[in-house]
Amino acid sequence: MGADRTRTAADARAVAMTAARIHGHSLPTIARHFERDHTTVLHATRRIEKTPPLRDLAAKIAAELPDEPAGASTRAAVDEQIPEAGYRSPGARAQERAVPVAGERRQLRVAR
């Protein structure tokens, strides 16, 4: 699903996230699949759990999912998704640049 924010699309995405969570997938794995943050998945699953018809739908979908995802018969597919040691996401690097070290802070000058 895309970035559509309509109620219908958001509910469908949340039900799919909840079904994946019920099926046993981790929050980060689900988040990567839907191109979202893991906290978004957590919020979606909590929201669906409070709505009985959608909760039942998610449980039904989760029950119909195959025990093993297609193409993931070996652990090699999972290992490919784990970043190597020393990997830092582009967002972490940008955040480090945005927050200067205490000794490097620029002093504000007062215009007179």
Image (spheres, rainbow, N blue to C red):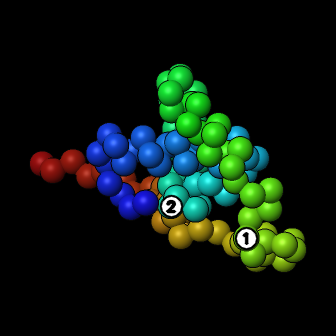
Q: Is residue 79 visible?
A: no
Query: Are there few (<14), some (14-19), or many (20+) residues within 10 Å of tag 1?
Result: few
Location of mark 1 (residue): 70
Q: Residue at the spot x=70%, y=53% of the render?
A: 65
- Say whether disc 1 or disc 2 marks the residue closer to the N-terminus: 2
- Rendering coords of residue 90 (x, y %): 53, 70
Location of mark 2 (residue): 35
- Is residue 56 placed above or below 101 in the rendered structure? above
Quarter of the image where one finds residue 70: bottom right
Q: Is residue 58 left or right of residue 5?
A: right
Total labels drawn:
2
Q: Nearer the viewer, mark 1 or mark 2?
A: 1
Q: Is residue 85 left or right of residue 17?
A: right
- Rendering coords of residue 3 (x, y %): 36, 58
Q: Nearer the viewer, residue 56 or 71?
A: 56
The amino acid pointed to by label 1 is Ala
Q: Residue at the spot x=32%, y=40% of the render?
A: 7
Helix, strand or loop status at disc 2: loop
| Quadrant, the N terminus | bottom left
- Rendering coords of residue 47 (x, y %): 50, 29
